[in-house]
Amino acid sequence: MPTPTISKEQVVEVLKTVYDPEIPVNIHDLGLIYDVDVDQSEVNVVMTLTSPSCPSAREIPASIESRVMKTLGASKCLVHIVWSPPWGPHLISPQGKKILGIVEGEPHDDAGLDGDVNPPER
């Protein structure tokens, strides 16, 4: 049986079915996915989490691996968690912001979450 050739677009569509249980936006639109690499039937996903103390830090990668392998027939799916660059609300897609009620240009309390890890000088 020949191994399936999987496209990056197919993987992204599967990623859009995975949600952080605490947030009503899929992980792709939430901006957690940094890269997807596909080599025939092997998939590598580079992602981050909303914080290092995310309670779903094991559940989300396991869900990605399971769904990509079952849905697309991937022979392997590895999820790599990275912390740089840090996640922030600026990474949320326009669709995700709409779901969360974030209006572009409207100030919202995301101090320290926008990738600016150095506080302003006083």
Image (spheres, helix red, strand yellow):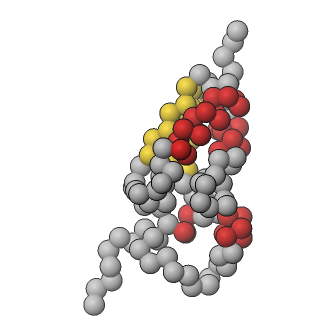
Q: Position of residue 116 (x, y in %)?
A: 39, 72
Residue at 61%, 33% (x, y): give it: 66
Closer to the camera, 4 or 70?
A: 70
Q: Position of residue 106 (x, y in %)?
A: 62, 84
- Residue 32, visible in the rendered structure: yes
| Quarter location, residue 111 | bottom left
Would you say 34 lies left or right of 66 here? left
| Quarter location, residue 7 | top right
Q: Is residue 102 above or below residue 70?
A: below
Q: In this view, does 107 lie above or below 61?
A: below
- Residue 85, visible in the rendered structure: no
Q: Where is residue 63 in the image (x, y as percent from the top left)?
A: 59, 40
Q: Position of residue 95 (x, y in %)?
A: 71, 64
Would you say 71 lies left or right of 80 here? right
- Given the current orientation, which residue lies at the most extreme left position? 122
Would you say 118 lies left or right of 63 here? left
- Given the current orientation, which residue lies at the most extreme bottom position? 122
Would you say 39 lies left or right of 101 here? left
Q: Is residue 85 above or below residue 78?
A: below
Locate the C terminus by quadrant.
bottom left
- Given the current orientation, which residue lies at the most extreme top position? 1
Residue at 51%, 80% (x, y): give it: 109
Residue at 71%, 43% (x, y): give it: 13
Q: Is residue 59 above or below residue 39?
A: below
**Count of numbered circles on the image:** 0
Locate the N terminus by quadrant.
top right
Closer to the camera, 94 or 61?
A: 61
Residue at 44%, 60% (x, y): give it: 51
